């Protein structure tokens, strides 16, 4: 046990002192030292002073770009057709508000025994079964309402809930 503690202590001491060594000395250059000024994007002497002779030797780090203009005008874009909306905002059905766990959500298709095709067709032919649903969560779960994401192009309906129940 003591041996393990000593090894752990030695490892921690080694990790603490890694990187604490002195930085290597910068390489000595012959002649004048130059530093790139990040603000001016130019190479300037390390002393920061620019004399008359040095002013000509300052070179920009970024080349200037020249813009050319064509004499030919740009062709006009072809007119695009905007499709007419299939239904106006007034004809959109208003969502039906339902509370999660309510009997109208869990009731399903009425009938006794196995369902017949006629019962299912009659239930699906009712337009209120295809209205978008606005789900309200019961007390205690209402904080999770912001996590419910229902796409606008594929709203939840009673018919879709019943399809899920039947599957």
Image: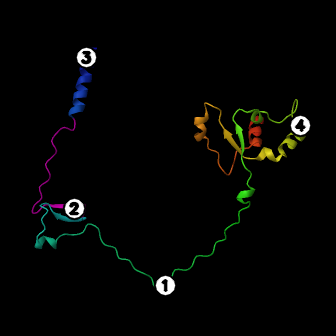
- Which mark identifies residue 37? 2
Residue in view at x 71 percent, y 62 percent: 85
Residue in view at x 49 percent, y 84 percent: 72
Quadrant of res 92: bottom right
Foreground disc of the pair 3, 2: 2
- Secondary structure beneath dot 2 equals strand
- Secondary structure beneath dot 1 equals loop
Comparing 60 with 94, the one in front is 94
Q: Are marks 4 and 1 in contact (CB under 8 Å)?
A: no
- Secondary structure beneath dot 3 equals helix
Query: Is 60 on the left-hand or right-hand side of 71?
Result: left
Residue that label 4 marks: 116
Give the crowd class for mark 1: few <14, some 14-19, many >=20 residues within 10 Å: few
Q: Are marks 1 and 3 in contact (CB under 8 Å)?
A: no
Report the Cα–Cα distance between label 4 and label 1: 72 Å
Q: Which residues are magenta?
A: 18-39
Residue that label 1 marks: 72
Q: Looking at the image, is 53 positioned above or below residue 1?
A: below
Point out the residue furthest to the top here.
1
Foreground disc of the pair 1, 3: 1
Quadrant of res 79: bottom right
Q: Looking at the image, is 5 positioned above or below residue 11?
A: above
Residue that label 3 marks: 3
């Amino acid at each position: 046990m003591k041996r393990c503690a000593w090894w752990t202590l030695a490892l921690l001491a080694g990790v603490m002192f890694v990187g604490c060594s002195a930085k290597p000395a910068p390489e000595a250059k012959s002649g004048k030292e130059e530093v790139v000024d990040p603000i001016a994007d130019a190479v300037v002497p390390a002393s920061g002073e620019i004399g008359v002779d040095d002013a000509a030797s300052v070179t920009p780090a970024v080349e200037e770009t020249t813009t050319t203009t064509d004499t030919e005008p740009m062709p006009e874009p072809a007119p695009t057709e905007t499709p007419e909306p299939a239904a106006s905002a007034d004809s959109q059905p208003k969502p039906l508000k339902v509370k999660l766990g309510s009997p109208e959500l869990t009731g399903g298709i009425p009938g006794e025994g196995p369902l017949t095709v006629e019962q299912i067709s009659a239930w699906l032919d009712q337009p209120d079964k295809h209205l978008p649903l606005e789900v309200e969560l019961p007390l205690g779960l209402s904080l999770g309402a912001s996590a419910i994401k229902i796409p606008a192009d594929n709203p939840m309906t009673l018919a879709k809930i019943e399809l899920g129940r039947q599957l």
